[in-house]
Amino acid sequence: DVVKLLHYNHGMDSAIYRFKGFRIALFYGDHPPPHVHLLGPGVKVLIEVESAKVKGRCDPKTLAEARAWIAAHQAEVMEIWQQRGAKR
């Protein structure tokens, strides 16, 4: 499967991937280290891009899918992190 990176503006965040009612997003001007937010019904999780460390709770299957996508697209996510004006 070829995955397209989404650049959907949702308020102050930029969703870069959507799956099963969840989205992986970056917040404009966010704090280091580089990370994404996994957002969905009742879910607000922060996942560091390079280490895959997680802050927050989510069901294991959804979290595993998000972490696998981030790992597979790490270079693209880092590029978007830099383009979106996130702090370093």
Image (tube, rainbow, N blue to C red):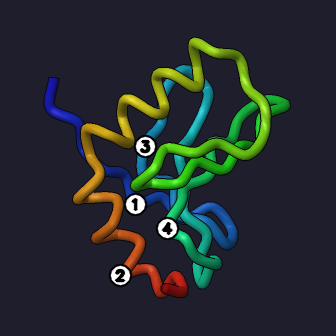
Q: Amino acid at mark 1?
A: His
In the displayed structure, 7 sits above or below 81; it is above
In the displayed structure, 64 sits above or below 13; it is above
In space, the residues marked 2 and 3 are separated at their CA atoms by 16 Å
If you read the primary sequence from the N terminus, does the residue marked by circle 2 or circle 3 appear first?
Answer: 3
In the displayed structure, 41 sits above or below 10; it is above
- Quarter in which the N terminus is drawn: top left
Are there few (<14), some (14-19), or many (20+) residues within 10 Å of tag 4?
Answer: some
Q: Residue sitting at 44 percent across and 80 percent down?
A: 84
If you read the primary sequence from the N terminus, does the residue marked by circle 4 or circle 2 appear first?
Answer: 4
Q: Is residue 8 left or right of residue 61?
A: left
In the picture of the structure, the residue carrying the numbered disc 1 is 7
Q: Amino acid at mark 2?
A: Gln
In space, the residues marked 1 and 4 are separated at their CA atoms by 17 Å
Q: Which labelled disc corresponds to residue 34?
A: 4
Secondary element at image label 1 = loop
Quarter where residue 59 is shown:
top right
Q: Is residue 39 left or right of residue 3?
A: right
Mark nearer the viewer, 1 or 4: 4
In space, the residues marked 3 and 4 are separated at their CA atoms by 16 Å
User: Which residue of the protein is positioned furthest toward the left in this rendering?
Assistant: 2
Q: Amino acid at mark 3?
A: Tyr
In the picture of the structure, the residue carrying the numbered disc 2 is 83
If you read the primary sequence from the N terminus, does the residue marked by circle 2 or circle 1 appear first?
Answer: 1
Q: Which labelled disc corresponds to residue 17?
A: 3
Mark nearer the viewer, 4 or 2: 4
Q: Is residue 7 left or right of residue 45?
A: left
Are there few (<14), some (14-19), or many (20+) residues within 10 Å of tag 1?
Answer: some
Q: Are marks 4 and 2 in contact (CB under 8 Å)?
A: no
